[in-house]
Image (tube, helix red, strand yellow):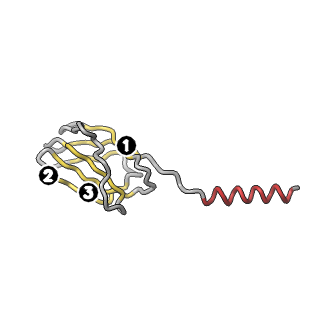
Amino acid sequence: MKTELLGAFAALALVAGVAPAAAQTVEFTLINESSQALHYFYTSPSNDNNWGYDLLGDSGTLEPGYNGNVTIGDGSEECIYDFKFVMDSGAELIEPGIDICELGSYTITD
């Protein structure tokens, strides 16, 4: 009986070892210290060629001098992301290779 129990525990440990990693949800503070309002904010894992949806939403704007909490919960297990900001003037800024797993805040400047 001891052998059967040890075999069952070994099988359980093997199954637990091959289980997929859980998708992460990351939160950080986005600070707008630029002279323009931010109208759109897109993110994407760096290994993905498609931008995600606008994290500010349909009516969201981050005015100069303000900050807001950002949640990235797209189901990805990646930490390295690209950011795309679209400002009031239509200017686009792309910031590649941001480690969101280590990010507490991100500041937009001119």
Between 54 and 10, the residue placed more toward the observer is 54
Q: CA distance from mark 1 to mark 3?
A: 17 Å
- Determine which of the numbered discs, if any, sits on residue 91 in the image: 2
Instruction: Name the residue at 83% across, 58% down.
Output: 4
| Badge 1 amino acid | Thr
Q: Is residue 77 above or below residue 41?
A: below
> Which residue corresponds to mark 1?
71
- Determine which of the numbered discs, if any, sits on residue 95 in the image: 3
Q: Is residue 23 above or below residue 63?
A: below
**Residue 94 shown left or right of residue 102 in the figure:** left
**Residue 88 shown left or right of residue 81 in the figure:** left
Q: Nearer the viewer, mark 3 or mark 2?
A: 2
Q: Secondary structure at mark 2?
A: loop
Q: Position of residue 103 (x, y in %)?
A: 37, 49
| Badge 3 amino acid | Glu
Between 38 and 58, the residue placed more toward the observer is 58
Q: Position of residue 49 (x, y in %)?
A: 31, 62
Instruction: Name the residue at 33% across, 39% down.
Output: 69
Q: Position of residue 63 (x, y in %)?
A: 19, 37
Instruction: Name the residue at 66% across, 58% down.
Output: 15
